[in-house]
Image (tube, rainbow, N blue to C red):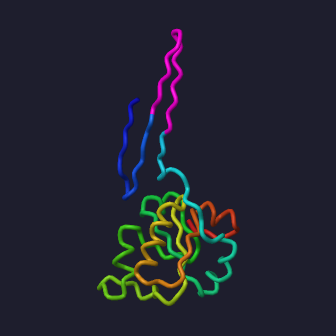
Amino acid sequence: MPISAFIYSGCLYVDIAIRYHRANATIAWSNPMPGFLRPAPTTTLPETLIDQIAAGAVTLIDIRDAAELARTGQAQGALHIPMMRLPMVADPRHPDHDARLSPDKPVALYCATGARSGMAARLLRQMGYAEVHNIGGLDDWIAAGGPCTR
């Protein structure tokens, strides 16, 4: 039974292929587990935060890269902080810190599917941010009626 595995963003993914031979018939079953292609569960429904974000009570962060943002636009009022820069920009002690971010102010994050924003939410909690929400992907925001800009 061939098994292949790889590590992506600290997670182990396994592809198992089982082959069963019987009377010249081959049945193949493969169970690839590409977790990065599946959306992560959201911790907060976007519709519960739309009014708070519009009022400025919650900071909305788009953690997708610039190419994704150029293709699809972004949620209105969202800060664009790519995932790779988030640890620096969110740390109040770092020279690149964005003053619009504060560990005491609620933060909501989104990406394309919710997977990266889930990782970013974990990171911000580890950095001491008190209230962090993963609202999923941009499509979740749009489906909830959140305004977007192109």
Please report the residue visible at 48 percent of the width from the left and 51 percent of the height from the top.
Answer: 35
Please report the residue visible at 53 percent of the width from the left and 9 percent of the height from the top.
Answer: 23
Q: Which residues are magenta?
A: 17-31
Counting from the top left corner in percent of width and height, residue 85 is at 36, 72
139 over 129 or under it: above or below: above
**Which residue in the rendered view is the most extreme toward the top?**
23
Task: Name the quadrant of the C terminus.
Answer: bottom right
Q: Nearer the viewer, residue 70 or 12?
A: 12
Please report the residue visible at 51 percent of the width from the left and 85 percent of the height from the top.
Answer: 130
Task: Name the quadrant of the N terminus.
Answer: top left
Q: Nearer the viewer, residue 118 or 27?
A: 27
Within the magenta stretch, is there residue 29? Answer: yes
Is 88 left or right of 121, judged from the image as shown?
left
Within the magenta stretch, is there residue 56? Answer: no
21 over 64 or under it: above or below: above
Please report the residue visible at 40 percent of the width from the left and 55 percent of the height from the top.
Answer: 11
Secondary structure mainly formed by the magenta segment: strand
**Which residue in the rendered view is the most extreme toward the left?**
95
The number of numbered badges drawn on the structure is 0
Counting from the top left corner in percent of width and height, residue 47 is at 69, 72
Is 147 left or right of 123, judged from the image as shown?
right
Q: Quadrant of the rendered structure where residue 54 is?
A: bottom right
Counting from the top left corner in percent of width and height, residue 71 is at 50, 57
Counting from the top left corner in percent of width and height, residue 140 is at 63, 63
Q: Nearer the viewer, residue 22 or 80?
A: 22
